[in-house]
Amino acid sequence: MRWVSTRNRVGSVEHKLEMPEAPDLDAAYVAFWRRILGDAIAQVDQLGWWTIAFQLSPRESPDEGEGKLKAGFWNASNHWCAHPNSYVLPSEAFVVLDQGQGDAQRHRELLTLYLEHYGRLREAAAVKPVPSLFRKARALRPLKVVAAVLDGWLDLRIGQPQTGPLPEYDRNLLAGDPAEMRGFRGGLCDGEWLALLHAVSGALIRFTPEHFETIECMVRAEGNRLFYQIGCPDFPDEGTTEPGQDVHQAMSRLVAHKIKNGEPFVGMRFVVQIQSDGTARTHAETLN
């Protein structure tokens, strides 16, 4: 295994753990923890971290490349840190092929994969020297670890016997009970759409730097995942492809609303303009 560091298309540093053809994935998880925690300790003043956030993006079609486990740092406001580093672990083990099995079964298979590998991450966190690195990091400031599931984030509670509770949608999905993503109440209602749009706008304003007077966000759907490009035309070097927790949750509810009402979702573009009195105007359009 070896680390390769590059810059992605928005200029953020990306650290990729490359593995041999027959990798020991559990050993890779230990190496993943060691790099992330080592950087957290070494760069505590520059990063301002309070949380490590994991996201698993599996391969969903035969034409796609390897699935990836990604990690990054959030600050105390649950925004991505101002000087972001992202960590990427690609693996052929991250795969759930879409075979037209229906949304509920498909989501259940995705969630099962997520929980399997988040469980292995928790186990790797108990392997030396990872526990001592956690102690060093937490001596500097509190450190939480979360992982993305289908309708929110799971508190991994590293070092404790169990994780935190799953969001209601994910919990019901596993139990085979009727499940709806939070915020969706059904019915085609202009008021509901405006409320969801307002939630996306507010989340984008809270997530982006204060000097962004115009916020542009493009979101596209590929399989069951959303991919983002967020930035400001006046500050082209400060964009990101990694949304914060609030942005992703607000966007997921808006997308669920459109799909539930029979509208296909390929992608949308949002432009939020901050006015001189502090209010915001939001324009949204569907991408082809």
Image: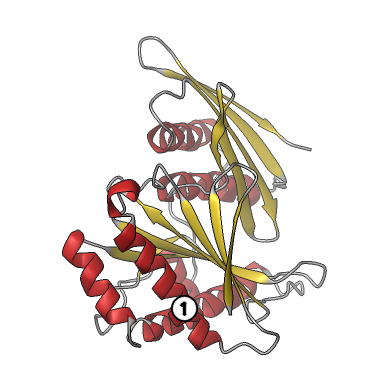
Secondary structure under tag 1 reads helix
Quarter of image, res 225: bottom right
Is residue 265 positioned above or below 104 on the image? above
- Compared across the picture, whether 16 is left or right of 211 comes to right
Residue visible at 35% across and 10% down in the picture: 277
Q: Is residue 58 visible?
A: no
Q: Which is more toward the observer, 135 or 163?
A: 135
The residue labelled by disc 1 is 31
Q: Residue 157: x, y in percent?
A: 28, 73
| Residue 222: image location, x then y, percent | 70, 56
Q: Residues within 10 Å of mark 1 (few under 14, many from 20)?
A: some
| Occupied quadrant, residue 164 | bottom left
Report whether residue 103 is seen: yes
Find the residue positioned furthest to the left.
139
Q: Residue at x 33, y 80 (%)?
A: 130
Q: Position of residue 207 (x, y in %)?
A: 41, 38
Is residue 96 shown left or right of residue 204? right
Relative to 105, does residue 41 appear above or below in the rendering?
A: above
Residue extending farthest to the right is 63
Image: 16 above or below 208: below
Q: Quadrant of the C terminus?
A: top right
Total marks shown come to 1
Q: Nearer the viewer, residue 34 or 265?
A: 34
Horizontal and vertical percent position of residue 179: 49, 66
How did the renderer colour the structure?
secondary structure
Please, what is the three-letter code of the amino acid marked with disc 1? Ala
State which quarter of the image contains the N terminus. bottom right
Q: Return the residue nearer the eye: 140 or 79.
A: 140
Residue lying at 17% horizontally and 65% vertically, measured from the top left? 139
* Residue at the image position 57 percent from the left and 46 percent from the top: 241
